[in-house]
Every structure is written in C-alpha cells, then in structure tokens.
Image: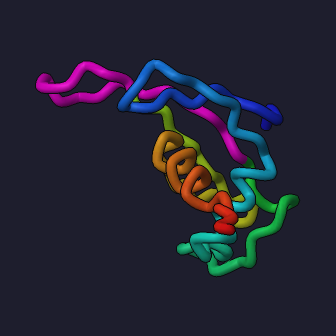
C-alpha cells in the first residue's frame, strides 16, 4: 500500500492525505480487528490495503466513491470502507483543549 492517498470530501473540494497510520487508527478505533470470515486477528502484516475510486451505478448520482479495500491475506475476504467517512471519523478524533 502507498503511504498516502488523496481523500475527497463530499462537502468541499478540499483534499488531504490519508496515511497508513490513520487507516490503522480507524480500523482499531472502530474495533475492526478481526476478519469477519475467518476470524484471524488483524495486524499490519496480514492484510493488504488498496485505495480505489469506484463509479456509482445509480443514475441519480454520478460522483465517484473513494473506497478503502481491505483484503485478508489468510482467507482472501474483502471489505470496503468509504475513505471520506474514514477522514471525517479521524477529524472527529482530534482532542480539543478547553481552558
């Protein structure tokens, strides 16, 4: 996997990089720590992560969807996650210090 990928947000044309560390933080923060098919515990060494852009089949929306494809190296199961949702979740995780 490349260390960074561009994430497009629905609300603006703003883009930012999504790092491998952020992807790991999302997966473990959302408790996505095991393969749903074989149950193997996920770590950096037993999943392949790919950044993809997919076209929507619906005629009502022509905007592409940027997805994260996670492939279990143990059984080959595939999961998809919307990268814009990951970016929004990560943005919400920043601590705000109140004085």
Q: Is residue 60 magenta?
A: yes
Left of 4 or right of it: where is 78?
A: left
Left of 52 or right of it: where is 64?
A: left
> Quadrant of the image for the N terminus?
top right
Tell me how many marks there are.
0
The span shown in magenta is: 49-64
Q: Is residue 75 visible?
A: no
For this orientation, the residue located farthest to the front is 99
Where is residue 37? Give x, y as percent: 55, 73
Viewer-proximal residue among 40 and 3: 3
Residue 16, by quadrant, is top right
Left of 45 or right of it: where is 8?
A: left
For this orientation, the residue located farthest to the right is 45
Residue 39, by quadrant, is bottom right
Q: Is residue 91 visible?
A: yes
Where is residue 63? Give x, y as percent: 31, 22
Write the residue at 57% across / 71% down. 30
Viewer-proximal residue among 21 and 46: 21
Question: Coloured how?
Answer: rainbow
- The vertical placement of 22 against 59, above or below, is below
From the image, give the main secondary structure of the stretch colored magenta.
Answer: loop
Write the residue at 64% across / 57% down. 76
> Quadrant of the image for the C terminus?
bottom right
Where is residue 15? Give x, y as percent: 58, 24
Q: Is residue 55 magenta?
A: yes
Write the residue at 12% across / 26% down. 60
Residue 34, by quadrant, is bottom right
């Amino acid at each position: 996997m490349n260390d960074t990928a561009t994430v497009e947000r629905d609300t603006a044309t703003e883009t930012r990089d999504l790092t491998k560390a952020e992807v790991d933080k999302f997966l473990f923060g959302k408790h996505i720590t095991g393969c749903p098919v074989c149950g193997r515990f996920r770590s950096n060494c037993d999943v392949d992560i790919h950044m993809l852009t997919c076209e929507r089949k619906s005629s009502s929306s022509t905007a592409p969807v940027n997805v994260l494809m996670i492939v279990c190296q143990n059984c080959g199961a595939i999961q998809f996650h919307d990268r814009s949702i990951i970016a929004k979740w990560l943005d919400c995780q920043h601590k705000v210090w109140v004085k």
